[in-house]
Image: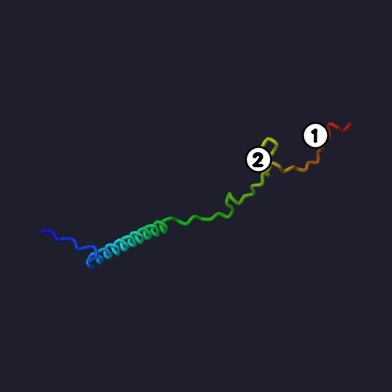
């Protein structure tokens, strides 16, 4: 013996649709809560990353591009003050 389905406009059908819609919303809410709890547990297990005093991104990155297009770091552009005369001037002096 089968039970016939109620007509679509009956209050019993509307109640069952509301029930299943509410049930689906409740299940989705519980899934989001479960995922949030898992994420919080993982976050607590990871040790905090120490922040360095001077990170590589903050270092001085001044560079000069030479005629061939190569980038030369600033530390290679420092000219030392020597007491000797430059080689070109030494050759030009009599």
Residue ranking furthest to the right? 94
- Image point (82%, 37%), residue name: 85
Please identify the residue farthest to the left as the structure is shown: 1
Residue 71 badge = 2
Q: Position of residue 44 (x, y in %)?
A: 41, 59
Q: Closer to the camera, 50 or 17?
A: 17
What is the quadrant of residue 73 in the picture? top right
- Quarter of the picture holding the N terminus: bottom left
Numbered disc in front, either 1 or 2: 2
Give the x, y percent position of residue 72: 67, 40
Q: Residue at x 38, y 60 (%)?
A: 36
Q: Picture quarter containing residue 47?
A: bottom left
In the displayed structure, would residue 35 be above or below residue 85? below
Residue located 58% across and 50% down the image: 57
Location of residue 67 in the rendering, given as x and y in whole percent from the top left corner: 70, 36
- Residue tagged 1: 87
């Amino acid at each position: 013996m089968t039970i016939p389905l109620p007509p679509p406009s009956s209050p019993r059908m509307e109640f069952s649709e509301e029930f299943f819609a509410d049930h689906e919303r409740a299940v989705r809410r519980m899934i989001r809560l479960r995922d949030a709890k898992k994420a919080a547990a993982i976050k607590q297990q990871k040790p905090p990353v120490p922040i360095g005093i001077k990170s590589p991104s903050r270092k001085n990155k001044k560079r000069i591009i030479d005629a061939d297009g190569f980038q030369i770091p600033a530390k290679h552009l420092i000219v030392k003050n020597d007491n000797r005369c430059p080689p070109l001037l030494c050759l030009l002096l009599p």
